[in-house]
Image (cartoon, coloured by chain):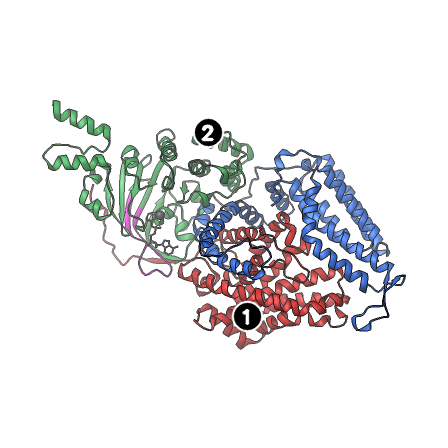
């Protein structure tokens, strides 16, 4: 878990309405999928980095994340460099190998496209954390509800998150008990050991947790959950001038992006 | 004071009227409480980082197992619970989601297709399964050499289970009656349906996002088949244990809803 | 004046159970009473509690007979949110009934669902937190509180909805003595200062004698005794059959009685005992 206490940080990003952030970041996500030209994606990455910097988030988080995505990044890069059907020959490696669809040389287009896809991966994977690192969960839920996501669905998400600590301590207790029977979890890398441990953990965890569902349901109902009236939200958030400004800019960028794409720009 | 105040005891004039009640406020037969708890377990499972690999269902191990069995435990509501858990985990622990912010779609599909099938809404299950497979082939990329093989190993089996009536009925019946022997292969098939829907959605998303060509997909196919088989086998063991345990302890599970 | 709560021959059977969980239960409760419900585990105490706000029969599959009247509502028909405005139900396990991210959201949850105006909710949340002694913790995570604080928080959550009746299912069973004492203090003050009607399920007989004006004993699905603490705790044998151990004071007093001391009414607290012995000695 990226343990960054949101309350201790005060940045311009945190003052924005949750909806603004959600919409803006979704637009970035859409744009990065829309374009496949490295220059365009690099520009988007620049925007994301500026947001990241203005939100005063640590760069370390991105580095940590990238560790997990390194394998995919390398695969993407290698596959595109060797197999992208480009024209501009840079390095000739061998004769064409039709069996594996390799032209025998590495092309400029292949490299650029590979770089574009890796950049796309980077943008995609840091966009979502950007949202949560700058928005306390209740605000995120409020934003979702205000954007017409059904309240019940948002409720499941928040409730799940607040039940998380008790589930985790439940799991820890099960694991403790299983340690005595020789089932370990920290033998890193050993796929089958991990798998066996998962199997041994899941059955008691699911059964034990479901046992609480009855009291949870009664407790929720006892506090008028699902009453057929318009619900009040204690937490409230209104668009400020800056929100409107950012939304306007975001939408302008989205429209421009779509137009550019239709005109054939930004595609590789 | 009395053991029961005699004046209070009025002998009923006729046998007391007994009314039977069905639980209210459920979505697809499941309570919001159960879905929240499932989602919470899902998030807890995501806290265990696993290496994401394109073509591999969202995450190896715990999450993949949970998705594969979710349909049998929760029915179609699994889609909602998985989606909620998936969205939160993807935001908190983005490590395992090779499809980025859309990663939650993969686990949603896994729960949805298997849940619909288990609820015997097989037409809908078929529709969503075909959408998943269709989305793979809509991408021109997928018409390259040998790419048609990628959905074959498990999505094709899933489609068979969904569409062939005797197979479908036998699978559902064996699980619902918790047949001592046949429950195992039946749960295996049901896990196949769930897992196949999940990883095929991942494949499709990754293919659209990163344009990986056949040189990646085709040679790695045997490897995926192996890994997915292991995941499905593990899911089968967990699934059988969970289903039997839930029934024994009278805990919420979708089979109950079907019986009512 | 009619009773606030009336049960008439209520029987409830969970789906797929062969035996009822509660059988032929009849009693009534007047406004302002403090009733303790005691009984061995599995007797059906929790099941009886769930009947108070319609959780039974509405949230379970099962069958039910009899008649119920809770503050003018019919739990068979009226929706739980309607009943929840009359009955605050605190279920057995404090941890599972806290599911919000902050304390203030937790306490406001019920009123939010009822659609009350924001200022009203904020005022009620403040009062409820004040009453249970948790003011100042508004922004904390409920899971980060101590067991006793969590239990008082759970009480605040239903108190904020301002019900006439509070039903508390074993609120102190998992607490240390100090935490339990604080929770019991809150419950007693709700009865005395706010005039709430209380139904308290507990295994702690000392609390029962100290606070309750009436005791109901549930054993093996049936209500077998209903009376004042003095009346109930003098039936040592009946209690023993139900695996209930009366307060030590009562055991001593009952022993003294059998030796020929005239202790009437039976002292149930230490103070009563001292008083009775003084009377015996001097008068
Ligand atoms: N959801 C349920 N389904 C079936 N039986 C139940 C359920 N909940 C409780 N019971 C049964 O009802 C009886 C009374 O339980 P309960 O009301 O919890 O007792 P107590 O609170 O006094 O310990 C027990 O025999 C228990 O097994
Ligand atoms: Mg109980």
Please say if B102 is above or below C170. below
Name the element at disc 2.
helix
Q: What is the display colour for chain C?
A: green
Please say if C35 is above or below B229. above
Q: Magenta segment range?
A: C7-27
Q: What is the display colour for chain B?
A: red
- The image quadrant of residue B144 is bottom right
Instruction: Please report, as a chain letter, where disc 1 is located.
Output: B
* Dominant SS in magenta: strand
In the rendered image, residue C103, in percent from the top left (x then y), is placed at 51, 36
Residue at image mark 1: B189
Q: Count numbered badges in the picture.
A: 2
Q: Is residue C79 shown to the viewer in this render?
A: no
Instruction: Please report, as a chain letter, where disc 2 is located.
Output: C
Give whichever of B172, A81 is nearer the camera.
A81
Name the element at disc 1.
helix
Q: What is the display colour for chain A?
A: blue
């Amino acid at each position: 878990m990226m343990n960054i206490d949101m309350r201790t940080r005060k940045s311009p990003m945190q003052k924005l309405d949750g909806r603004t952030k959600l919409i803006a970041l979704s637009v970035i996500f859409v744009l990065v999928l829309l374009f496949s030209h490295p220059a365009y994606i690099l520009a988007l990455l620049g925007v994301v980095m500026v947001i990241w910097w203005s939100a005063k988030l640590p760069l370390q988080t991105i580095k940590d994340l990238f560790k997990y995505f390194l394998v995919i990044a390398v695969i993407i890069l290698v596959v595109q460099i060797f197999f992208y059907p480009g024209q501009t020959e840079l390095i000739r490696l061998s004769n064409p190998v039709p069996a594996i669809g390799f032209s025998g040389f590495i092309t400029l287009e292949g490299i650029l496209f590979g770089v574009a896809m890796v950049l796309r991966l980077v943008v995609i994977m840091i966009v979502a954390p950007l949202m949560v690192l700058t928005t306390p969960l209740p605000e995120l839920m409020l934003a979702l509800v205000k954007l017409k996501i059904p309240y019940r669905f948002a409720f499941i998400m928040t409730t799940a998150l607040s039940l998380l600590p008790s589930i985790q301590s439940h799991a820890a207790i099960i694991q403790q008990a299983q340690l005595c029977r020789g089932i370990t979890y920290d033998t890193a890398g050993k796929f089958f050991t991990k798998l066996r441990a998962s199997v041994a953990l899941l059955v008691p965890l699911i059964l034990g947790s479901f046992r609480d569902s009855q009291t949870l349901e009664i407790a929720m109902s006892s506090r008028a959950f699902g009453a057929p009236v318009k619900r009040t939200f204690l937490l409230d958030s209104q668009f400020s001038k800056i929100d409107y400004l950012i939304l306007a800019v975001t939408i302008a960028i989205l429209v421009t992006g779509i137009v550019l794409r239709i005109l054939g720009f930004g595609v590789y | 004071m009395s053991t029961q105040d005699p004046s209070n005891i009025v002998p009923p004039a006729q046998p007391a009227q007994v009314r039977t009640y069905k639980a209210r406020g459920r979505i697809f037969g499941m309570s919001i409480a159960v879905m929240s708890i499932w989602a919470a377990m899902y998030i807890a499972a995501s806290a265990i980082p696993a290496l994401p690999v394109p073509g591999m269902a969202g995450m190896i191990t715990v999450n993949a197992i949970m998705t594969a069995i979710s349909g049998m435990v929760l029915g179609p509501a699994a889609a909602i619970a998985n989606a909620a858990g998936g969205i939160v985990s993807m935001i908190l622990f983005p490590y395992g989601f090779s499809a980025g912010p859309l990663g939650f779609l993969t686990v949603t599909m896994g729960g949805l297709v298997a849940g619909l099938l288990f609820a015997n809404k097989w037409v809908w299950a078929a529709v969503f399964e075909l959408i998943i497979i269709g989305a793979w082939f809509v991408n021109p990329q997928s018409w390259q050499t040998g790419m048609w093989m990628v959905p074959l190993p498990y999505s094709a089996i899933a489609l068979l289970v969904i569409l062939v009536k005797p197979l479908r009925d036998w699978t559902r019946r064996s699980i619902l009656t918790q047949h001592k022997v046949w429950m195992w292969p039946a749960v295996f098939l049901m896990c196949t349906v769930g897992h196949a829907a999940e990883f095929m959605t991942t494949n499709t998303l990754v293919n659209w996002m990163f344009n990986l060509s056949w040189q990646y997909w085709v040679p790695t196919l045997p490897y995926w088949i192996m890994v997915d088989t292991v995941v499905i086998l593990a899911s089968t063991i967990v699934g059988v244990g969970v289903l039997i345990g839930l029934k024994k302890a009278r805990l919420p599970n979708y089979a109950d809803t079907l019986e009512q | 004046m009619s009773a606030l709560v009336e049960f008439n021959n209520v029987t409830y059977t969970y789906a797929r159970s062969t035996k009822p969980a509660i059988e032929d239960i009849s009693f009534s409760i007047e406004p302002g009473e403090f009733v303790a419900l005691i009984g061995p585990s599995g007797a059906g105490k929790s099941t009886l509690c769930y009947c108070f706000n319609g959780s039974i029969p509405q949230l379970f599959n099962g069958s039910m007979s009899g008649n119920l009247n809770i503050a003018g509502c019919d739990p068979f028909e009226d929706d739980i949110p309607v009943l929840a405005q009359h009955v605050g139900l605190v279920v057995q396990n404090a941890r599972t009934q806290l599911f919000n991210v902050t304390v203030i959201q937790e306490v406001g949850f019920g009123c939010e669902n009822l659609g009350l105006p924001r200022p009203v909710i904020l005022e009620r949340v403040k009062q409820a937190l004040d009453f249970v002694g948790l003011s100042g913790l508004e922004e904390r995570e409920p899971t980060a509180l101590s067991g006793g604080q969590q239990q008082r928080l759970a009480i605040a959550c239903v108190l904020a909805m301002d019900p006439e009746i509070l039903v508390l299912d074993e609120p102190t069973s998992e607490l240390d003595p100090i935490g339990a004492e604080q929770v019991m203090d809150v419950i007693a003050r709700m009865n005395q200062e706010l005039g709430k009607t209380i139904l308290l399920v507990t295994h702690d007989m000392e609390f029962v004698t100290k606070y309750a004006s009436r005791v109901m004993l549930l054993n093996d699905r049936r209500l077998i005794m209903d009376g004042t603490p003095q009346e109930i705790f003098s039936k040592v044998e009946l209690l023993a059959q139900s695996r209930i151990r009366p307060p030590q004071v009562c055991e001593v007093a009952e022993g003294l009685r059998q030796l020929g001391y005239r202790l009437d009414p039976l002292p149930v607290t230490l103070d009563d005992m001292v008083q009775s012995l003084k009377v015996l000695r001097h008068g």
